Image (cartoon, grey):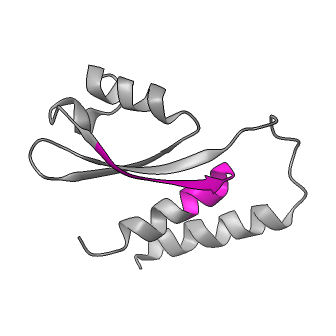
């Protein structure tokens, strides 16, 4: 795993150990993976997959996917909190293709 991801995970674990502020009821975060038209993959996190996928298709969500449309949702995973989904994203990005 890259050092920057290890540092990020350590900071996120330290934050999780602190008492969390009250989150909005029902706020579930997801990790998602998109396949772009050129065969590349884009990984992100969101709490509303439908809205985020629509933004990617419109070309307003990310500079990376803007030039690689159309995109297809190939994977999604419920992660619970935002910090858990970001930690999972770091782990997925460190995997080989």
User: Quick check: is 34 in the magenta stretch?
Assistant: no
Name above or below for residue 21 compared with residue 91.
above
In the picture, measured across the screen, residue 80 lies left or right of residue 53, that is right
Quadrant for the C terminus, please. Answer: bottom left
Please report the bounds of the magenta region as a residue range.
73-87
Quadrant for the N terminus, please. Answer: bottom left
Task: Give the residue displayed 17% in from the left and 53% down from the top.
Answer: 40
Name above or below for residue 16 compared with residue 64.
below
In the picture, measured across the screen, residue 50 lies left or right of residue 42, that is right
Horizontal and vertical percent position of residue 5: 48, 69
> Where, by quadrant of the figure, is residue 83 drawn?
bottom right
Name above or below for residue 71 compared with residue 7.
above
Task: Give the residue displayed 61% in from the left and 56% down from the top.
Answer: 79
In the picture, measured across the screen, residue 82 lies left or right of residue 25, that is left
Task: Give the residue displayed 71% in from the left and 69% down from the top.
Answer: 13
Horizontal and vertical percent position of residue 87: 56, 63
Judge by depth and name the residue closer to the eye, 34 or 60: 34
User: Quick check: is 75 in the magenta stretch?
Assistant: yes
């Amino acid at each position: 795993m890259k050092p920057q991801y290890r540092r990020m995970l350590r900071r996120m674990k330290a934050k999780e150990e602190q008492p969390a502020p009250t989150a909005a009821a029902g706020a579930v975060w997801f990790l998602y993976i998109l396949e772009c038209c050129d065969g590349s993959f884009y990984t992100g996190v969101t709490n509303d997959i439908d809205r985020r996928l629509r933004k990617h298709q419109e070309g307003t969500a990310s500079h990376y996917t803007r030039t690689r449309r159309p995109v297809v949702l190939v994977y999604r995973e419920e992660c619970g909190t935002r910090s858990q989904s970001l930690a999972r994203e770091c782990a997925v990005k460190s995997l080989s293709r």
